[in-house]
Each structure stands twice: as structure tokens, then as C-alpha cells.
Amino acid sequence: MYSKKKPEDLDCGIEVSMKIFGGKWKPCLIDFINKGGSLRPSEIHRAIPTATPRVLNMQLRELESYNVVSKKIYPGLPPKVEYSLTEFGKTILPIIAMLDRWGIQHKDHVKKADETMKVLRAIR
Amino acid sequence: MYSKKKPEDLDCGIEVSMKIFGGKWKPCLIDFINKGGSLRPSEIHRAIPTATPRVLNMQLRELESYNVVSKKIYPGLPPKVEYSLTEFGKTILPIIAMLDRWGIQHKDHVKKADETMKVLRAIR
DNA sequence: GGGCATAGGGAATAATTTTTCCCTACCGCA
DNA sequence: TGCGGTAGGGAAAAATTATTCCCTATGCCC
């Protein structure tokens, strides 16, 4: 969590939404934890190797602080921790599904537009 | 538009979605242009005074390059330009509506969590 | 002991995005 | 001529977010 110097407007619904699950890996984490039911950090790290453990830790901590995921710490050694989605977290699932569907549906259009721009930049 | 040094995965639906309307002012712009039907830049700027004209210009340019909005330039002076949502752009509306609804619904929860964190940080 | 696994954090750096400042050019008005 | 309105962009600074590097600590196995 980083502290902000610019004020945020938490009466704007979109800003609230983005604050909670707008991070780079958060939708991914929410989706994956949902599918897994209850997951240990190491399982999550292995499943998303593109992100370093550190990043995932930080984003998990944020998600936890907003009660999107809950963290169960089992005492004893070796340490064991499990993350699972809360009921609140589950309310985000339909949104993530929608974002994903829209993106999949239109990715070709987006890729083509990127290509076109690349060509245009090369000419100019 | 900024050039990226890290690769992006345009086969991930969420990443595609975020790329297109994930910018700070983009959902706002899309929503507002939709409501207005067809708007001149100066009208948009006056409606969203929190953002400087420069930012809105840039985000409009990006939206245009992905064919989310279309730009009509009327020849003659003084210059006249009008932005409107394309059919493609309209497919984003339900998503924005959903994000907004979720945020409004849960903003109190989020505010409270922020408060709690602030207090905890102050104590420690 | 040395290596690997468990979970996690501090500090610095890099990448990305947003903002600020200041400029172009033309017309109309007083 | 000077000011305001039209639309817009370059360059640099600031803010935000993500990443890398290198630590903590414990237990197990060879």
C-alpha cells in the first residue's frame, strides 16, 4: 500500500472499484483464489510465476485489508497460511468475469489497432 | 500513449479491458460522452474540471485510436470538433455501469477500512 | 553444515501514468 | 493591439505502481 498525495474521491463508484481490484494482479488473484477455494501462498506463487512472490504478497495484503480475502494462519512449523475469498470478495467475481469476457471478445480488434498504430509510427 | 518496456499479454481478457478503459479518466469520459451524445472538447473540459484539458485530450486520443469514440472535425474557423461514442464504445457501457454500481454499493465499507488502517498506522 | 522449503518484509529502483507549464494558430470583439 | 475562445501538443516534473535485491526465522533431509 502506498500513500497518496493526491486526494481520491471515494464517492465515485468507479474510483472505489479500481481502488479495490484495479491492481495489476488483483483480478488474477481473486479469480485464482476463488477457483482454488483455499490456497497457500506458495501455491499461488507457483500458479502465477510471472509475478514475483513479493508483489503477490503485497497485493494479497491489500486485498486482505479490505476484507476481499481472508487469511488463516495455522500455528506451528513449518508456517502454513491459507487465503480464501470472503463473501464480500465473491461479489467481485461477476465483474471480473465480465471484464475478462469483454477483453477476450475484443482482443483481436485491439491487437489490430495496435498493429496499425505501430505501422503508422514507423512511417512517420 | 506511452510506450511500454514490459511485455503485455493481450490474450488476457482483463489486461485488454484495462488497456482500453482502465485510464484514470476514461470511464468518466465514456460515460459522459454517451450521455451527451456528441460533445465538443470544451464542453467536456468544463464538465470535468478536475482534470486538465491536456489529460482529457490525451485520453480522448487513445480512445479514438481504439475506435471507442469517433471524432468529427468540422472544417472552418473557429475550429469545431465533436466526439461521440461508437457502437464499439457502447459495448463498454454495461461494464462501466457495473463498476460504478459496485463501487457505490461498497464505498462505505471501503471508507471504513481506510479509516481503520489510518488509526492502526497512527498507533504503531 | 549446506541446501531447500515454509511465509514474509525493508529499501531502493524501474516502469508507468498523470500533471504542470508553456507553446502554436486563427478569429472576433472592444 | 490585447484579451478571450476555439483545438491541441512538446517537454519535463511529479505521482503512482510494480519490480528487484537481499534480508529475517525455523525445520527437515542428506
Image: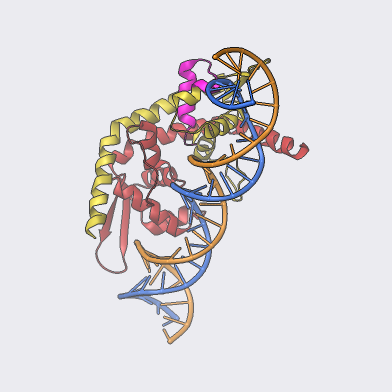
Chain colours: A red, B yellow, C orange, D blue
Q: Nearer the viewer, residue A15 or B91?
A: A15
Q: Is residue B28 left or right of residue B83?
A: left
When the figure is inspected, residue B16 is found, relative to residue A64, above or below; the finding is above
Q: Residue at x 27, y 40 (%)?
A: B111
- In this picture, residue B67 sits left or right of residue B123: right
Q: In the picture shown, does residue B113 fall above or below A57?
A: above
Q: Position of residue B122 (x, y in %)?
A: 24, 56
Predominant SS along the magenta part:
helix
Can residue A87 be seen in the rendering of this structure?
no
Magenta range: B23-43
Q: Quadrant of the C terminus of chain A?
A: top right
Residue A49, above or below B35: below
Q: How many marks?
A: 0
Residue B107 lies in the magenta-colored region: no
Asked if residue B54 can be seen in this view, the reply is yes
B35 magenta-colored = yes
Q: x, y percentage for residue B89? A: 53, 23
The residue positioned 73% from the left and 35% from the top of the image is: A120
Pinpoint residue D1: horizontal percent, then vertical percent.
Answer: 64, 26
Residue drawn 32% across the image and 32% down it: A11
Residue B71's spot in the image, x, y percent?
61, 21
Depth check: A43 or B47 in front?
A: B47
